[in-house]
């Protein structure tokens, strides 16, 4: 049996299942594919051995379509787990587009993780971009359509930059291998920006908060798992140890905190929180030590689980209540107790409470930063840790399930949703306690780390209790930002307000210029036509009677001109 699945890319069964789902009208068959394909991918993963497979010679290039090593191992496993949980979570939904796009998207992300060369990486990079946009458009409303177009534009740009950078890099180095790239060449810089777009670097991040909350209930959960963590993997593979990533990641951890505090849409709060958590991973990659890379990998693994769990819980709320706005929610713990518990598990995990998965991963990154002696960045990360507790650990469950009771009396989430959330919550707790299972998957096994030391536990609990106390005081004295029915913009104001206004003004000016040019051209042609009419018309100058004397003079003049030309031409 093991030989049957040996050396087969786990991406293959998932992509094939997605292509089949795209043409199969039967919903039961599609849901079976959504569950069976990740299981089949898991069997392929368990039978893989360290090495490079699927080598293809094409057009003078050597493509390595399946490279399974210490770093791709952990990312590929969590992508397979996420694909299964997403399939289970979406069993109640009857949408062929979401079923097909979700599978192809997950398979594309897996293919990118296994890519051993930049050309293969580019191909799967584009597969994820094109397939994922349909998860947004599946919402089938005007806002989702416009957000999807913006999303597709920025991700196609990422692909163009990646391909251009890869061509330049291959020309400079003579190799298409996807290994450490660095920023020493123009090609490397373009690839870095391409990765940064999908990783939602500062000023390149707006597609995330813009598009994710506008996708379908199931689509948002699927989107939260793959694109950004695929980019984190790419950075770890190609740019580990780049100092600039330390400062980029630190900024990523900080700025979402302030926007998440005032945001009313709880799914958008989670999108900002996702950006915050990515910052921790980027800092770890920038530090570049074995402990730091292990921390980034571990954090990516557990983050997919607890962030997916939080998006699932808010998706369940949206499915039952019809809204995920904090200003319209509250008191749902009475109607949706199981969803409330699962949301609290996700909140405890993302806040890095001891005995939950976030603690055993995030503390590894903090320890790596401290070992590097970068205390300013360490302080920034500690502040960001308190911030994520406020907006994801407290705000999400408080305003959705407790707070002011809006009187919503709804049914609990569908059984399949509860099962997916239950499995996610179980893994969050299991990995927080049996963290050795997680650490066994990490790239560097020689980097020994013990998360449950007295200093780590006490220090983290002090931070958490302080943040909880601050939230309670601010809420009590009325200083906590009120939840308002509004749309908040951050740097996307540049293109959604300023850019939109500039584009409208430019179009108006061009229209006026075109109209003015048309009027001027019309007047010119009218004038020329009038002159020609005056000369050649039946009543024009050439039709008038000309005195014979005048005609004789003109005839003599023309004859003289002809004779002069003939003389000089001989």
Image: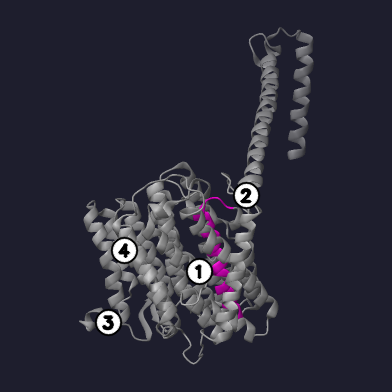
Look at the image and give the residue range highlighted in magenta: 263-288
Q: Which badge, 2 or 4, comes first in the chain's sequence?
A: 4
Q: Earlier in the sequence, mark 3 or mark 2?
A: 3
CA separation in Å, label 3 and label 2 = 49 Å
Residue of label 4: 419
Of 523 and 260, nearer the camera is 260
The structure residue drawn at horizontal position 61% and vertical position 67%, both measured from the top left corner, is 467
> Would you say 450 lies left or right of 554 here?
left
- What distance separates the C-alpha of mark 2 from that of mark 4? 41 Å
Q: Position of residue 568 (x, y in %)?
A: 77, 38
Q: Nearer the viewer, residue 557 or 535?
A: 535
- Which residue is depicted at the point 64% across and 52% down? 478
Q: Is 497 in the magenta? A: no
Gap between marks 1 and 3 measured at Cα: 36 Å
Indicate which label's residue lies in the foreground, 4 or 3. 4
Marks 1 & 3, CB-CB < 8 Å contact: no
Q: Residue at x 30, y 59 (%)?
A: 416
Which mark sits nearer the N-terminus, 1 or 3? 3
Name the spot of residue 321 as percent of width and height, x first. 41, 47
Residue 127 lies, with reference to residue 377, above or below; the image says above
């Amino acid at each position: 049996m093991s030989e049957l699945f040996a050396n087969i890319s786990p991406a293959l069964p998932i992509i094939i299942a997605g292509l089949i789902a795209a043409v199969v009208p039967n919903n039961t068959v599609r849901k079976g594919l959504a569950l069976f394909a990740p299981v089949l991918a898991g069997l392929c993963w368990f039978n893989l051995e360290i090495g490079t497979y699927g080598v293809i010679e094409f057009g003078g290039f050597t493509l390595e379509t399946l490279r399974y090593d210490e770093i791709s191992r952990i990312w590929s496993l969590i992508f397979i787990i996420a694909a299964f949980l997403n399939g289970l979570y979406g069993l109640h939904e009857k949408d062929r587009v979401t079923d097909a796009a979700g599978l192809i998207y997950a398979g594309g992300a897996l293919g990118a993780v296994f890519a051993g060369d930049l050309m293969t990486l580019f191909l799967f990079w584009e597969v994820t971009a094109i397939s994922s946009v349909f998860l947004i458009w599946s919402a089938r409303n005007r806002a989702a359509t416009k957000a999807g177009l913006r999303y597709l534009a920025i991700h196609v740009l990422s692909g163009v930059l990646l391909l251009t950078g890869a061509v330049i890099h291959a020309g400079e180095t003579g190799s298409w291998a996807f290994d450490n790239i660095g920023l020493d060449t123009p090609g490397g810089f373009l690839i870095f920006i391409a990765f940064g777009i999908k990783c939602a670097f500062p000023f390149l991040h707006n597609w995330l908060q813009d598009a994710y909350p506008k996708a379908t209930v199931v689509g948002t959960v699927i989107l939260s798992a793959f694109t950004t963590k695929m980019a984190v993997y790419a950075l770890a593979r190609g740019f580990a140890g780049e100092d600039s990533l330390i400062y980029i990641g630190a900024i990523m951890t900080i700025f979402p905190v302030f926007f998440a505090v005032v945001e009313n849409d709880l799914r958008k709060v989670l999108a900002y929180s996702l950006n915050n958590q990515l910052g921790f991973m980027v800092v770890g990659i920038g530090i570049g030590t074995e402990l730091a890379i292990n921390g980034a990998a571990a954090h990516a693994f557990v983050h997919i689980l607890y962030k997916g769990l939080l998006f699932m819980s808010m998706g369940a709320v949206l499915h039952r209540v019809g809204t995920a706005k904090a200003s319209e929610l509250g008191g749902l713990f009475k109607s949706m107790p199981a969803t409330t518990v699962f949301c609290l598990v996700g909140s405890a995990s993302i806040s890095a409470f001891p005995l939950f998965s976030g603690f055993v991963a995030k503390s590894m990154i903090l320890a790596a930063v401290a070992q590097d002696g970068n205390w300013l960045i360490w302080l920034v990360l500690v502040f960001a840790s308190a911030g994520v507790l406020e907006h994801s650990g407290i705000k999400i469950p408080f305003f959705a399930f407790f707070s002011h009771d809006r009187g919503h009396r709804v049914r609990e989430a569908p059984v399949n949703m509860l099962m997916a959330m239950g499995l996610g919550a179980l893994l969050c707790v299991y990995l927080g306690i049996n963290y050795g299972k997680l650490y066994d998957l990490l790239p560097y096994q020689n980097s020994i780390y013990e998360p449950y030391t007295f200093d780590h536990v006490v220090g983290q609990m002090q931070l958490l209790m302080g943040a909880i106390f601050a939230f309670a005081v601010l809420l009590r004295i009325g200083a906590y930002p009120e939840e308002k029915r509004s749309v908040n913009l951050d740097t996307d104001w540049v293109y959604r307000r300023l850019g939109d206004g500039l584009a409208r003004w430019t179009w108006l000016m061009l229209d006026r210029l075109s109209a003015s040019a048309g009027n001027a051209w019309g007047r010119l042609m009218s004038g020329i036509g009038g002159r020609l009419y005056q000369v050649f018309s039946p009543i024009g100058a050439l039709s008038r009677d000309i005195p014979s004397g005048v005609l004789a003079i003109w005839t003599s003049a023309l004859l003289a001109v002809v004779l002069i030309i003939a003389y000089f031409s001989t």
